[in-house]
Amino acid sequence: MDYSLEVIAIPVSDVDVSLRFYVDQVGFHLDHDVSHVPGMRVVQMTPVGSACSVVIGEGMPLGEPGSTKGLQLVVGDIDAAREELAGRGVSISEVRQLGPEGMQGSRFAFFSDPDGNGWSIQEIKR
């Protein structure tokens, strides 16, 4: 049996603000923004190149806005990714070495969405 993680839900306080952040600043692709049921809105976005999407919305039991930590994106060139995000107005940390110099997967940068949900970017050269 295969178990494929394909959607992560993130609690936010303002769907429109978060939608603009993730699509316009972080560069996620907007898959859909639907309201099939009164009081419920589902916005699904996918990071470019990812098989896993992110869902935000209204009327869903997602938890407290800003309570999600440890979300991780993997890139082949963290310096270019950091420069791209900073250029789009994302407040992102400097690249940090979190392991021995030259060790695969030990370079990271960090940012948060408008509610404080925490993201990291990890460099893994493939």
Image (cartoon, rainbow, N blue to C red):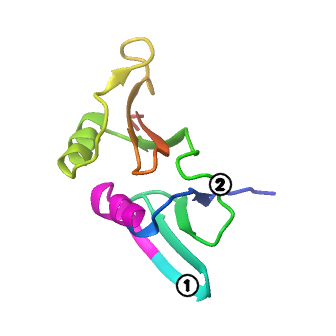
Q: Earlier in the sequence, mark 2 or mark 1?
A: 1
Q: Main structural element of the magenta stretch: helix, strand or loop?
A: helix
In three-dimensional space, the C-alpha distance between marks 2 and 1, rounded to whole angstroms, equals: 19 Å
Q: What residue is shown at x 40% (from left), y 69% (from top)?
A: 16
Under mark 1, the amino acid is Ser
Which mark is in front, 2 or 1?
2
Relative to 52, say whether 15 is above or below. below
- Residue at 49% from the left image edge and 46% from the top image edge: 117
For disc 1, the marked residue is: 35
Give the amino acid type for the residue marked by disc 2 in the picture: Gly
Q: Residue at the spot x=45%, y=50% of the render?
A: 115
Percent x, y of residue 44: 51, 70
Q: Is residue 125 magenta?
A: no
Q: Taking 11 as reference, is 100 left or right?
A: left
Above-or-below relation of 57 to 124: below
Q: Which residues are magenta?
A: 17-31
Q: Quadrant of residue 86?
A: top left
Q: In terms of depth relative to the viewer, which is nearer, 50 or 21?
A: 21
Q: Which residue position is annotated with label 2? A: 63
Badge count: 2
Q: Are marks 2 and 1 in contact (CB under 8 Å)?
A: no
Which image quarter is the C terminus in? top left
- 124 and 73: which one is in front? 73
Mark 1 nearby-residue class (10 Å; few <14, some 14–19, many ≥20): some
Helix, strand or loop at label 2? It is loop
Residue 70 rendering spot, x and y as whole percentages:
55, 38
Percent position (x, y) of residue 34?
Answer: 52, 83
Mark 2 neighbour density, 10 Å: few (under 14) some (14–19) many (20 or more):
few
Left or right: 17 with respect to 80?
Answer: right
Where in the figure is residue 19, as x and y percent of width and height?
Answer: 40, 66
Q: Is residue 20 magenta?
A: yes
State whether residue 63 is above or below residue 99: below
